[in-house]
């Protein structure tokens, strides 16, 4: 597709992501060792607790979701630690949509959004993952609703993003992992889409997460966590971008050393809170917010009930 054939949303993507090499940041080759040393030193006080009988998991796994929960409402976090995860249409929609986007990136020829969604569902049904059981058990009404919602999101992606060229090195849902203290603490994540690669100490990668709905500061923190993981692995990315499919709009952020240090501090804070709560050394506090709508202890939480009745999102239809 020639540039002249891009629609305005696609042209915006190309313009944002296509920075000339001379405009890309350079990072010190020793930065990854500096970040690792900082994390190892500040997390060292947790080692004895994690490896003791007071911490059931024996290994502390930290993802973007876990950090967001531990640093949010602590009572909700503790309730969800004891609640087994339950698949639902909203949860499955994100997984199916991401799989459909992954297939679209590598699909030879053209495919309609619903064809990609149907293929994504078929692949997930045969995968060795818990979603396979949900997809096999859900009734036709739920399956039709899931197909419609994932199809709409896949359509929005195909409308807003230009076809991704192989020379851009597109990668979808590729795991990133960092192990600290001999694997006792594990940081892991899977960005929705990455483009580009570093050249020497010149950053070239762009990390993108797809969202729908309104902007949330937590979306930016998710991407900063991915940037930290990339920095610990090889070199930081040059740019982070949350892309809101239903708005056709980017929220970009350039990666700097200060941003990475801030992301490391957030991991340290979240890890300490997680271990203190899980080991019973900290009494959970309540922090009402929009997530009260999905809290498993909502019916027994006066603060959450008051927020839902009187808060800024009272009466919202989502």
Image: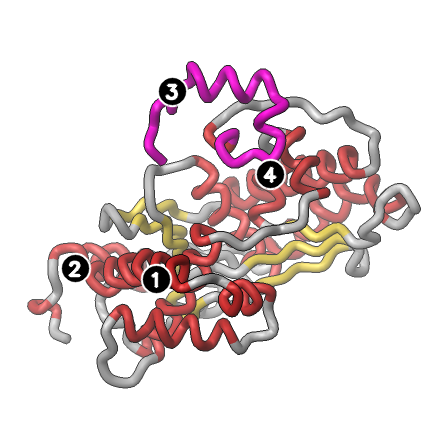
Q: Are marks 1 and 3 in contact (CB under 8 Å)?
A: no
Q: CA distance from mark 2 to mark 1?
A: 33 Å
Label 4 vs 1, first from the N-terminus: 4
Q: Nearer the viewer, mark 2 or mark 3?
A: 3
- Give the quadrant of residue 204: bottom left
Pointer 3 residue: 312
Q: CA distance from mark 4 to mark 1?
A: 31 Å
Q: CA distance from mark 2 to mark 3?
A: 36 Å
Pointer 4 residue: 69
Pointer 1 residue: 144
Crowd class of label 1 (few under 14; some 14 to 19; many from 20; radius 10 Å):
few
Q: Nearer the viewer, mark 4 or mark 3?
A: 3
Q: Quadrant of the C terminus?
A: top left
Q: CA distance from mark 1 to mark 3?
A: 33 Å
Q: Nearer the viewer, mark 4 or mark 1?
A: 1
Residue 17 numbered tag: none
Q: Nearer the viewer, mark 2 or mark 4?
A: 4
Q: Position of residue 249 (x, y in %)?
A: 25, 47
Label 2 vs 3, first from the N-terminus: 2
Residue at the spot x=17%, y=55% of the render?
Answer: 9
Pointer 2 residue: 11
Residue at the spot x=33%, y=79% of the render?
Answer: 166
Q: Horizontally, is 270 left or right of 291 in the view?
A: right
Q: Which residue is outermost to the right? A: 53
Q: Position of residue 168 (x, y in %)?
A: 33, 72
């Amino acid at each position: 597709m020639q540039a002249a054939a891009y629609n305005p949303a696609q042209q915006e993507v190309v313009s944002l992501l296509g920075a000339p090499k001379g405009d890309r940041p350079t990072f010190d080759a020793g930065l990854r060792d500096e970040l690792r040393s900082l994390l190892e030193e500040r997390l060292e006080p947790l080692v004895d607790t994690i490896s003791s009988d007071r911490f059931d998991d024996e290994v502390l796994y930290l993802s973007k979701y876990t950090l967001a929960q531990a640093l949010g409402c602590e009572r909700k976090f503790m309730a969800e630690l004891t609640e087994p995860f339950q698949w639902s249409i909203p949860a499955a929609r994100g997984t199916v949509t991401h799989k459909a986007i992954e297939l679209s990136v590598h699909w030879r020829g053209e495919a309609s959004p619903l064809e990609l969604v149907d293929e994504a569902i078929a692949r997930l049904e045969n995968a060795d993952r818990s979603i396979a059981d949900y997809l096999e058990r859900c009734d036709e009404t739920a399956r039709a609703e899931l197909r419609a919602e994932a199809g709409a999101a896949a359509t929005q992606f195909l409308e807003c993003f230009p076809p991704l060229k192989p020379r851009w090195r597109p990668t979808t849902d590729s795991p990133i992992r960092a192990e600290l203290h001999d694997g006792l603490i594990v940081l892991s994540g899977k960005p929705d889409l990455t483009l580009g690669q570093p050249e020497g100490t010149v950053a070239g990668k762009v990390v993108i997460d797809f969202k729908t709905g309104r902007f949330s500061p937590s979306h930016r923190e998710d991407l900063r966590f991915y940037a930290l993981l990339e920095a610990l692995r090889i070199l930081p990315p040059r740019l982070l971008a949350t892309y809101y499919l239903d708005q056709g709009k980017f929220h970009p952020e350039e990666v700097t050393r200060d941003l990475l240090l801030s992301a490391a501090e957030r991991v340290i804070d979240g890890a300490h809170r997680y271990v203190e709560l899980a080991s019973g050394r900290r009494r959970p506090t309540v922090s009402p917010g929009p997530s009260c709508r999905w809290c498993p202890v909502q019916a027994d939480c006066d603060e959450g009930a008051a927020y839902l009745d009187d808060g800024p999102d009272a009466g919202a239809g989502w």
